[in-house]
Amino acid sequence: MNPIIPVVGTLAVVILMWLFFRPPFGKNIVRLNTDQRIVALTYDDGPNPPYTDRLLDVLAKHNVKATFFMIGNRIERHPETVNQVIAEGHQIGNHSYSHPLLGFLPPFYVRREIERTDNLLQQFNITGEVVFRAPVLTRFLPVAWVLAKGNRAHISCNVWSWDWTTQNPDKITETVLKKTNLGSIIVLHDGKAENRNANRSGTIEATDRIITALKRDGYRFVRLSDVSDRL
Ligand SMILES: [Zn+2]
């Protein structure tokens, strides 16, 4: 066999994998473009009462606004919680309809998952652009393709709280504070995709501590819509 064949084959596989997992088009936002002490708290996988409501109380206590990436089928189940999140001045984002690993699904399915939740959110009279984050941040080729065609960015993050693996508030707080810096987008979870009614007490307690510590360090908290010019 010509020795060039396995080399070319390996190279082709690497390029295809790179194209699939890191599509080099469209916009993927991992942090705010700033040199100021501002950060965005984001909460995925809700609405999930009563934990979302308890989280709202903590945010209100600190007068902090956040962005909630909600799952469509949870929105259908808990519209009153969605209304409460909006009434308290937070931003709502689209986190798909049923939280599948979108990045591995065909574009027509990706589009349907996104549109279904967009349509649901229209009932809540949300003004401005509805931001989107793929489940498990799987912005792979099909997702990037659909978003780019719709001229829509993907909102990722640069601080993973790992609160989907632990509800120990000490661990969540430590992980977030260690990684947060100027312009960080922090991902936490007020729900759990694979588990309805998941207890999120650890995330709520950690949120209280994270806000207290970051405020002490001079940080301000923004919704993504507050800084759309920095995305
Ligand atoms: Zn999620």
Image (spheres, grey):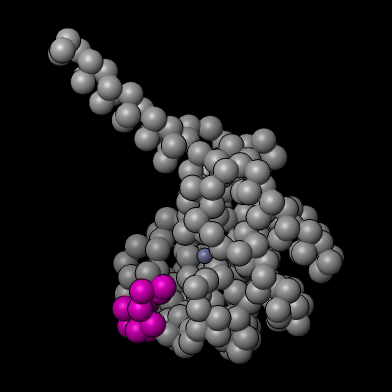
> In terms of image quadrants, where is residue 64?
bottom right
Q: Left or right: 87 with respect to 201?
A: right
Whole-percent x and y of residue 34?
Answer: 51, 49
> Which residue is painted at 56% across and 70% down in the image?
45
Of 8 and 134, the residue lying toward us? 8
> Which residue is painted at 63% across and 76% down in the image?
47
Q: Is residue 164 shown in magenta?
A: yes
Whole-percent x and y of residue 158?
Answer: 42, 55
Image height of 195 relative to 154, above or below: below
> Which residue is painted at 65% across and 62% down in the image?
97
> Which quarter of the rendered picture does the N terminus lie within?
top left
Q: Is residue 29 visible?
A: no
Image height of 186 relative to 114, above or below: below
Which residues lie in the magenta part? Answer: 163-173
Image height of 106 relative to 164, above or below: above
> In terms of image quadrants, where is residue 74?
bottom right
Q: Left or right: 214 with respect to 102?
A: left
The mark tally for this picture is: 0
Of 74 and 124, the residue lying toward us? 74
> Which residue is painted at 70% across and 40% down in the image?
150
In the picture as drawn, the residue positioned furthest to the top comes out as 2
Q: Left or right: 4 with respect to 130?
A: left
Of 13 and 53, the residue lying toward us? 13
In the picture as drawn, the residue positioned furthest to the front comes out as 1
Image height of 181 relative to 59, above or below: above
Q: Is residue 200 shown in magenta?
A: no
Q: Is residue 123 visible?
A: yes
